[in-house]
Image (tube, rainbow, N blue to C red):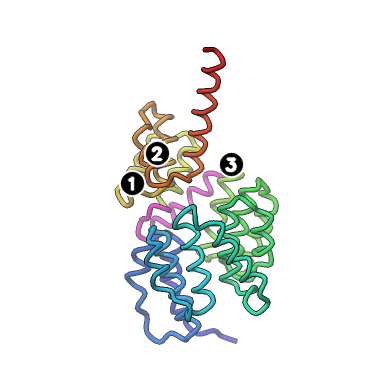
Amino acid sequence: MASGPDHLFNLRNNFYLGAYQAAINNSEIPNLSQEDIVERDCLVYRSYIALGSYQLVIGEIDESAATPLQAVKLLAMYLSSPENKESTIASLREWLADPTVGNNATIRLIAGTIFLHEEDYSEALKHTNAGGTMDLYALNVQIYIKMHRSDFAEKQLRVMQQNDEDHTLTQLASAWLNLAVGGSKIQEAYLIFQDFSEKYPMTSLILNGKAVCCMHMGNFEEAETLLLEALNKDAKDPETLANLVVCSLHVGKSSSRYLSQLKLSHPEHVLVKRAASAEDNFERALQSFA
C-alpha cells in the first residue's frame, strides 16, 4: 500500500537536528489528521523542552490532553527541578503499569529518556527494547553506547538501516556509533555531520558533532572554531560548553570561564559532577599531607 505524503517530515527533521526554534516556528501545518496533530504537538513541546522552556510545557498541557502529550509533560516536570524527580518517576511508573496506556510509543520513549538520565540503563531498556519506532531504536543505540555495548548498538542500527537507511535518525545513530567505536570510524562520523551541514541549516548539534570528530582526530583548532560558532547560536548549550572545556585544555587555553558557565546553567551536567569530584579528591589529598 502506498502511504500518503509525510506532512511532518520537515518538523521531525528540524527536531532531530537540533533546529528547535525552527521546528516551533514552522509547526502550523494544514491538513493534518488527528494523529498527526498529536505528534506535531509532541514535537513542538519537546522542542520547547530542549530549549529549557519547561514551565511553558507544564502550563500548556492540561489533564484533558492526549496520552503522548501527558508523557511529554512528565519529561518537562522531571527536568524542571531536582525536587520533582522522585514524584515524576513515581507518576511515570504508574502510567507504565497501566495496560491501557503503558505500551504507548511516546510513553515508552519518555520513560527511556528519563531512566537514561537516571543512568538506570536496564530500566530504560525494559521500556524501549521492543522498539517499534525510529525514535525508540535511536534511543536504544544511545543507551547501549552508554553501557559500552557497541555490539548491541550495532544490532539496533542494522534494524534502523533495514527500515530506512536514509532516515535522519539512522544517519545520526550511525555517527554516534562510529564515534563510540573510534579509530578509522571517526572519519565516517565526520562525513555524516558534514553531509548534514551541506543539506540543512547549521545547528549546535551538527557543529558539536563535527567538533567532537575533529577532537578525536587531533584537530583541536578546527574543533574550537566550530564550537565557538555553536556558542554564538546558543550560549547556554551544555554540550557546546562541555566540549569547549575539553578543547580549551588541549589548545593550552583557560577553560575556567566555560566551566563556570556550565556550572551556572547546567549544575547536573556530568562534566560538572566529575570536576567537583576531582576537586574533592584533590582537597582530601591535600588534607592528608597537611
Disc on the earlier residue, 2 or 3: 3
User: Callout 1: helix, strand or loop?
Assistant: helix
Q: Are marks 2 and 3 in contact (CB under 8 Å)?
A: no
Q: Are marks 1 and 2 in contact (CB under 8 Å)?
A: yes
User: Callout 3: helix, strand or loop?
Assistant: loop
Q: Mark 1 belongs to which amino acid?
A: Leu
Task: Estimate the spatial distance between the alpha carbons at disc 1 and disc 2, rounded to whole Å.
Answer: 9 Å
Q: Mark 3 belongs to which amino acid?
A: Gly
Query: Where does the image place residue 6, in percent across and percent down from the top left?
Result: 47, 79
Q: Which residue is mark 1?
A: 231
| Front disc: 2 or 3 | 2
* Residue at the far top in the pictured view: 290
Query: Where does the image place residue 130, in percent across and percent down from the top left?
Result: 69, 67
Q: Is residue 258 above or below residue 57?
A: above
User: Callout 2: helix, strand or loop?
Assistant: helix
Residue at x 46% of width, y 52% of height: 193
Query: Where does the image place residue 7, in percent across and percent down from the top left?
Result: 44, 79
